Structure formats: C-alpha cells, structure tokens
Image: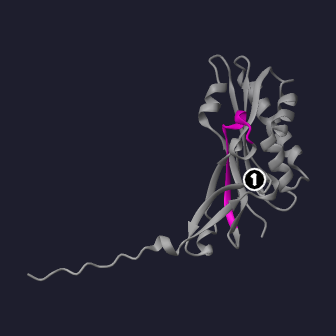
Amino acid sequence: MAKARRRRVKDTWKEKQWYKIMTPTEFGDAEIGTTPARDPEMLIKRSVESSMRELTGDFSKQYVKLYFQINNVAGDIANTKFIGHHVTTDYVRSMIRRGTSRIDTITDVATKEGYTLNIHIIAITVKRAKSSQQKFIRETMGRIIHELTAEKTFPEIVEGVISGKMASTIYHETKKIYPLKRVEIIKTKVVEEPN
C-alpha cells in the first residue's frame, strides 16, 4: 500500500507582525488595540470599533460606540480616521417610555473641508405629542443641526457630537416647542470625504 505523503503546513503566523492601532489626534492619539498583518498594506481600510469608556475611562459613556478606519501605517503604528459612531439600541430603548413620543431626524451636513456626515438625532418627549408638534420639532432639529455645523471643521463637528454639546443646544431650542425629556445624536456616519 502506497504511503500518502503529508504536506507540510506553512505557519503564516510567524510571518506576521503586530501593529498598534492608534486613534486620530482629535481622540488623543490613544492606543485602541493591536492587530497582526503580514504586510502593512493589508491593514489599510480595516475597521476598528471602540467604546467611549475605553478611550476616556468614563463608565457612564459605555453606550457610545466609535468606529475608526486604518488609513496609514508608519513603522509598527497603524493610524486611523474617524468614520462614525452610534449609541447602543438598549440605551435608546431605555429612554423611551409608554406615553412618550420618539421623534427622529436624519440629515446630511457638510463640513468646511468638504466632508459629508450623515447625522441621526432623536428627541424623546415627556408626554405624547401631536403629529403637528412632532413635525415642527423634526424640522427645528434639522435646521439647528445645519446651523451648528455650518462653517465648522470636521474635528469640531465630531467633538461637538461626541461631547453632547450639539445635542444639548438642540434640546434647549426644541423644548420651547414641547416639553422634552431628552435629545440625543444616536448615529453619525462619514458619507463622503474630500478628494
């Protein structure tokens, strides 16, 4: 009986190098993990997720998930750019109670440098609002976010969204229309980048 020759399996792990993944400057150049790769080019466009708690140590911000994409590799450092964020669905659900209204506004805003960001804002009312009030709140939120982002740079908008300053401004303006419990920017996504 002929003996089958065993093929030697090449261990590709030994060829791989570990790279430190760093956040963009606006997030303090923090290390958010490590990743192996045989070739640094393979890392480009790889997406990485991190929570706000991991970056700041603030446990109350655990529900904020940040998304980064590796855009260049220098030595053993993989640098990233911010591509969006979202708030966990269980946190959104925890804000909504029976007898309240959830009002959503989704809009695209442009930055000074030519980025286009898709922003999703929700407002939660104290009591159920009439559809005419909801429509007015929706339009007002859209108008305010465009005013807040006009003439601002990409890092300024990201900082305003993540810190909650923009949501706070929208809340103070829209609560004049109808009593609100909360306004939150629950999702952002970079739709277009400048060439």
Q: Is residue 67 magenta?
A: yes
**Above or below 13: residue 118:** above
In this picture, is 112 found above or below 85?
Answer: below
- Nearest the viewer among 91 and 60 is 60
Image-based side of 60 in relation to 174, left or right: left
Q: Give the range drawn in magenta.
A: 57-71
Q: Give the residue number, with chain letter if any, for mark 1.
A: 117
Would residue 157 be found to the left or right of residue 15 on screen?
right
Res. 84 in view: yes
Residue 46, located in which quarter of the rendered image? bottom right
Q: Please, is residue 193 above or below residue 60 in the view?
A: below
Q: Position of residue 2 (x, y in %)?
A: 12, 83
Position of the C terminus by quadrant:
bottom right
Whether residue 110 appears in this view of the structure is no
Residue 74 point in image, percent of width and height? 72, 72
Q: Which residue is rendered at x = 83% and y = 49% of the image?
A: 157
* Quarter occupied by residue 38: bottom right
Estimate the x, y position of residue 179 in percent, counting from the top left: 80, 20
Residue at x 62%, y 38% (from the top left corner): 88
Give the residue drawn at x 67%, y 64%: 70
Q: Hey, which residue is sitting farthest left in the picture?
A: 1
Q: Does the magenta stretch include residue 145?
A: no
Q: In this view, does 13 lie above or below 80?
A: below
Percent from the top left, x then y, of residue 34? 62, 60
* Label 1 neighbour load within 10 Å: few <14, some 14-19, many 20+: many
- Disc 1 marks which amino acid? Leu
Residue at 69% over, 47% down: 85
For mark 1, give the secondary structure: strand
